[in-house]
Image: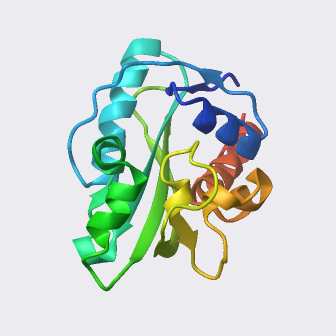
Amino acid sequence: MKLHFATSNTNKLRELSTLLEHELISVPLDLQEIQTTDLHELLKFKLQQAYEELHAPVIVEDTSLYFDAWNELPGPLIKWFLTGLGLEGIVQALSQFKDKSAQAVCCLAFTDDGKTMHFFEGKLKGLIVEPRGSRNFGWDAIFQAAGQQQTFGEMSAEEKNRISPRGKAAAEFKQFLRLQAKQR
């Protein structure tokens, strides 16, 4: 099955293609993002737009970062925080709080008919730390997963994919695709 991935982020495309062991067709749609902390509401909105544009099986994705000290903000709004504050600014803003714990959540949403939507979610607890490692991929340099000594930015792609929320969500989606293929 040809799978379209509504993203212009080459890092996300490469990572998800690797995790799914499936070549995805990148579709850089300019999807409107509603401002909400409800990840499923955001993805439903994005998925509807993507399907209306393509009329083909399509995946949308959002990866959120929730800070316990901020009552789970920024959540899906993390990319706007990154744009406005940068990594150092986010760490500095959180420095006023004793609690540096966070949860990273990735949710993939898929439809092949524009009506039925499937959601696949991966979660990982961790801490927000001073930036370390590669700064080429979102907030990877400031997120240190629980039980790990390195940030995502310091890990190899294989190490990160093994524990990341995107890796967990992709594993669920991959299993779903296998079951769908068997039913055909």
Q: Is residue 131 or residue 138 the one in the foreground?
A: 131
Specify the quadrant of the image occupied by residue 100: bottom left
Q: Residue at x 67, y 27 (%)?
A: 24
Image coordinates of residue 41 in percent, x first then y, are: 28, 46
Query: Viewed as shown, does residue 48 lie left or right of 169?
Result: left
Q: Is residue 98 above or below residue 8?
A: below
Image coordinates of residue 119 in percent, x first then y, are: 47, 49
Asked whether residue 170 appears in the rendered view, the answer is yes
Query: Viewed as shown, does residue 160 lie left or right of 165?
Result: right
Color theme of the render: rainbow
Q: Give the quadrant of the C terminus.
A: top right
Query: Viewed as shown, does residue 127 lie left or right of 99?
Result: right
Image coordinates of residue 120 in percent, x first then y, are: 52, 53
Query: Viewed as shown, does residue 14 lie left or right of 59?
Result: right
Q: Residue at x 47, y 26 (%)?
A: 113
Q: Is residue 29 above or below residue 81?
A: above
Image coordinates of residue 111 in percent, x first then y, are: 49, 33
Asked whether residue 71 appears in the rendered view, the answer is no
Q: Residue at x 47, y 63 (%)?
A: 104
- The single residue placed furthest to the bottom in the displayed view is 98
Q: Is residue 67 or residue 91 the one in the foreground?
A: 91
Q: Give the quadrant of the N terminus.
A: top right
